[in-house]
Amino acid sequence: MPLSAPSLDGLLVAGSPPSYRRHQPETTLLYRLVEQHYPAFLANLETEGRALPDYVQQELTDYLKCGRLEQGFLRVRCESCHHEKLVAFSCKRRGFCPSCGARRMVESAALLVDEVLPLRPIRQWVLTVPFPLRFLFAAYPELMSRVLGIVTRAISTHLAQQAGLSSKEAPTGAVTLIQRFGSALNLNIHFHMLFLDGVYVQDPNGEYGFRHPPPQPSSSFTACCSASASGWPASWSGGVSWSGMRTTAT
């Protein structure tokens, strides 16, 4: 097991064997800030009769243990040269740890590209909702599933109609990622939907082929958004704001 890959002026040489470099979170600025100020922050809250939610405390506590050898590790040994490496346990949290968050992001992207998304045109649809609905969705996550179903049906029907067919005759596909916060870490529940920009149509022989509709005017997207909003229960105040649509190809 090599200690490091061959390099030239700090760059990896093409075709060099992979190597492992242990993550050391204690050397990062974020870790040092949390480690230094988090206990005092909790103490100040306690003197004021307040406290962080349990899940927030658990997130920060686990982050301070992530990647630290003293919190547990695996001992990995090369079968050929018998060289050993210590691999520290990670916190595997979703909300705060940059290392675990980046690893999950990369793994999810690789899964989508390699095993889920076909080599077809993809369009991203972004759905944002008014502030009252953001709080509603945060308190009742099951409502997000209802909304996602309504929006998915509306877009699927729109794509099928552009192909001159019904949604039952021309299925499509989509992957949705739900984001719960904005750039300022404020509550901003919104959907990022990766939709196939077209439909699958079955020929007389039973084979499916992909049909990509011609470019559509913006009015057709507006009509699709209106159809989606009309499917929401009337008791939900507010409306739907479609923050943007852009086309990417894979």
Image: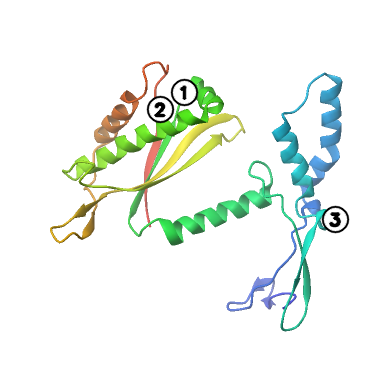
Query: Circle 3 is placed at which residue position?
Result: 70
Q: Residue at x 68, y 72 (%)?
A: 19
Quadrant for residue 233, please give it: top left
Q: Residue at x 78, y 60 (%)?
A: 73
Badges 2 and 1: C-beta atoms under 8 Å apart? yes
Q: By what rule are the colours in the image chosen?
A: rainbow
Badges 3 and 2: C-beta atoms under 8 Å apart? no
Query: Circle 2 is placed at which residue position?
Result: 241
Could you tell me which secondary element the residue under label 3 belongs to?
A: helix
Q: Earlier in the sequence, mark 1 or mark 3?
A: 3
Residue 187 x %, y %: 58, 29
Residue 117 x %, y %: 39, 56
Query: Circle 1 is placed at which residue position?
Result: 130
Could you tell me which secondary element the residue under label 1 belongs to?
A: loop
> Which amino acid type is marked by label 1?
Pro
Q: Which mark is residue 55?
A: none
Q: Earlier in the sequence, mark 3 or mark 2?
A: 3
